[in-house]
Amino acid sequence: MRELNQRAVLARLRTAGPATRPQVAKDTGLSKPTVGQALLDLERRQLVREIGRTSTGPGRSAVVYGENPAAGFVLGIDIGRERLRLAVADLSGAIVSRVDERNRCRSARGLVRLVGDLGERTVAEAGISPADVVAKVVGSPGVPDKETGGLQHAQNLPGWGRRGLIDELTGALGEGVVVENDANLAAVGELTAGAARGAETFVCITVGTGIGMGIVVNGQLFRGAHGAAGEIGYLPYGTAQGTPPERGMLETEVSGDSVVRKAHQQGLVDVRSAKDVFELARKGNEPALKAVGEEAKQLAFVVGAVAAVIDPELVVLGGGIGSNTDLLAEPLEQALRGTTPLRPRIVAGELGETAVQSGAIAMGLRSAREVVFDRALELRTS
C-alpha cells in the first residue's frame, strides 16, 4: 500500500506539475498524512524535491514539490542514411545534450562503432555518467527480427539486416537498448509533442530517402503480426515485372530519388537532390513544379490506399520530402479528389527532422520512470 501511495503521488506530480501537499491530497484522494509520508519517502529516494514555497494567501507558506528530473536520463538515437541524431533527456523530457552528425559510414560494422562513440559523447556532454542513463531507444529504418537479431527491409543501410546486429548495437551502447522502426517513432513523436496530439487513430507517413508509415490505432502504436505494419514501400504499384525491386515497388516511385528522376524527366538534368527540386519549385520554376506535382499525385495513391484500409482521422506527412506540404498539399488534394471519396485530414508534421528522436525520447521515458522508481525501491530495501 505504501508503494502504491508513492506511485500515485509521483504520477500526480508528473502529469499535473509541481504542487503542495494539500493540492496533491485533493487531486489523488489520499489523506494529507498519507501524502506527507509518501512525499517524505520519495524525497529520501531522490525522486521528488522541494522546488519552492507558496507566497500568496494568509498564514504560513507551503512547500511546493516537484518530480526530480535528474533521477534518471534517456538516450534517444535516430539512425538514418544521411544523418545520425542523438539526444539525452531528463525525466521531464527536457533535452540536456544533443549531437547531430553526418553518416559517412558504408558498412554496418563502422556504423555501429560510430553510433557507440556518438552515444558516449552525447552522454558526456550532458555532464552525467553512463549509469545515469536508464533507457536507450534507437530509431532505425527496417523491422527488428527477433529470430536473427537483424533489421530486415533496411536497404538504405548496407549490412543492417545481418544476424546479431541488434546485439552489436547493445554492445556499443550498453545494456537496456530498445530498437524500434523509425517511422513508428516519428508517429510516437507527433502523438506526444507534435501535429497528432489528441488523435486516437492516425498515420504518420515519412517520405525521404525512402518511405515508411507509423500507425497509431486507439492511441496505441500498431506494429502488425511481424512488426512490418507500415512498410508501405512494398505496396504494389504499377505493373509486376517478375522479381520485385529490392526497395519495393512504391518506394521506387515515391521517395527522394524519384523526385530527382521526375525533375530530370522535365529537363532539369543538373539537379542532384530533392531539396534542389523543391527550392526551384518555390521560386516558381515550371519544370520543378511539374515534378513536385507528379510526386504529389503518387503520394495521393498512398493516402487513398491507407484511408481505405485504416480509416485514419488524420494523416501526418513528415520526412525530408513529406514536410514540403506548402508545395505538395494542393496537387495532392486535387489528385485525391479524382482517386477516392475517402479523404482524411492531411497535415504537416510539426517536429521536422527531430520527429524520430522525439519519439525515441518519449518511448524511453515510459520505461525510464519505472526503472528509477524500482531502482530507488531496491536501494531502500537493501
Image: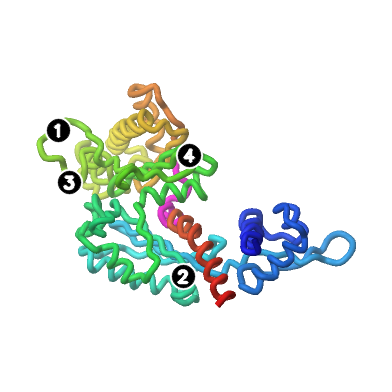
Identity, as a three-letter code, of the amino acid under mark 1: Ala
Front disc: 2 or 3:
2
- Give residue 102's position: percent from left, percent from top: 32, 63
- 3D distance between C-alphas at marks 4 and 1: 35 Å
In the image, taking residue 296 as reference, residue 343 lies left or right, namely right
- Give residue 197's position: percent from left, percent from top: 53, 44
Of the pair 140 and 11, the residue shown nearer to us:
11
Q: In which quarter of the view is residue 52 placed? A: bottom right
Mark 4 or mark 3, earlier in chain: 4
Q: Check disc 2 and report its element: helix, strand or loop.
A: strand
Q: Residue 246: give its label.
A: 3
Front disc: 4 or 1:
4
Of the pair 94 and 350, the residue shown nearer to us:
94
Mark 4 or mark 1, earlier in chain: 4
Magenta span of residues:
348-358
Identity of the residue furthest to the right in this view: 58
Identity of the residue furthest to the left in this view: 242
Identify the residue shown where x is 21% and y is 45%.
247
- 3D distance between C-alphas at marks 2 and 1: 48 Å
Q: Residues within 10 Å of mark 1 (few under 14, many from 20)?
A: few
Q: Residue 133: give its label.
A: 2
Identify the residue shown where x is 48% and y is 60%.
367
Q: Which residue is mark 1?
A: 240
**Tally of marks:** 4
- Give residue 138's position: percent from left, percent from top: 37, 60
Front disc: 2 or 1:
2
Q: Which residue is mark 4?
A: 218
- 3D distance between C-alphas at marks 2 and 3: 37 Å
User: Is 351 in the magenta?
Assistant: yes
- Give residue 151's position: percent from left, percent from top: 26, 55
Q: Residues within 10 Å of mark 2 (few under 14, many from 20)?
A: many
